[in-house]
Image: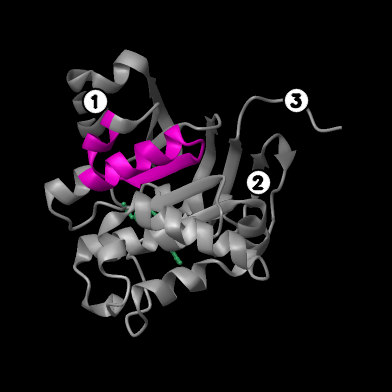
Amino acid sequence: MPEQTKEMVELVDLRAGYGALPVLHGFSIAVAPGEVAVLLGLNGAGKSTAVKVLCGAVAATGGSVRYRGEEITGCSTAGCVQKGIVMVPEGRRVFGGLSVERNLQVGSWTQRGNRGWVEAQRAHVYEVLPRLAERRDQLAGTLSGGEQQMLAIGRGLMANPSVLVIDEASLGLAPVIVREILKIARNLAEEGTTVILVEQNVGALEVADVGFFVDQGVVTATLRGKELADGELIRSLYLG
Ligand SMILES: Nc1ncnc2c1ncn2[C@@H]1O[C@H](COP(=O)(O)OP(=O)(O)OP(=O)(O)O)[C@@H](O)[C@H]1O
Ligand SMILES: [Mg+2]
């Protein structure tokens, strides 16, 4: 019997790196169902590495990944997606030569054979991301940066995630689009999806239930409640 836990995702004392380069040195976070968690930290802090371990894209050399209380360390990326852990990677990476609609179709591979669900979910994605609905026949390569980010999120939603990880959603986007995307993340959490945002933009804390500051491969501070709006505390953590 797995140990009972209220957490959706737990990364416990993770160690990971690339070849001889160690990056995570005992990285631990816990995120409850339906929360928005934000990982903040400077370039190279290990944020992407940590979420890649969660999604099975980078191997842990120590520690464990738990999902709904189950030990899943070493699960493949495809296995993680099947379980409901879905990553929207950095850099959007939509299929530029395919339409918006076809890109969404590609995201639904875990649900293939379940046509009714795929169609209902696509309708839902268009409701959550109305900018995509207006552009469903447009080639993804001709979308604006913000629209491509929304499409990348929409494609992730087509895999029916319980945990959606979005790496650097706001990078290079205008503030108004960033706010729109953060609001979308918040709304997804209100619907019950657990959302993990990797960000360099401290503004993301406005939609967070929990914020983790990452520095040199470890979590150096965990903020909840009022702390998430404590500008002075956040500045001191971010600027050191
Ligand atoms: N595929 C890789 N091969 C070798 N080293 C890597 C690889 N990916 C990341 N690294 C290194 O691991 C360290 C942590 O990188 P990571 O991408 O986790 O940081 P990050 O916190 O996401 O940074 P950023 O905010 O710039 O995206 C960096 O020193 C980086 O150069
Ligand atoms: Mg990164």
Magenta highlight on residue 73: no
Q: Which residue is mark 1?
A: 234
Question: Above or below — where is 135 with respect to 80?
Answer: below
Expressed as whole percent of the image width and height from the top left, the position of residue 197 reads 38, 44
Report if residue 192 lies within the magenta region.
yes
Closer-to-camera residue (50/26): 50
Name the amino acid, label 2: Gly
> 10 Å neighbourhood of mark 1: few (<14), some, or many (≥20)?
some
Marks 3/2: CA distance? 22 Å
Query: Residue 193: x, y in percent?
Result: 50, 40
Which residue is at 66% across, 41% downward? Answer: 67
Q: Magenta part of the protein: which range? A: 180-206
User: Of tags 1 and 2, which is closer to the observer?
Assistant: 1
Circle 3 is placed at which residue position?
4
Quick one: SS at disc 1? helix
Q: Which residue is mark 2?
A: 62
Q: Residues within 10 Å of mark 3 (few under 14, many from 20)?
A: few
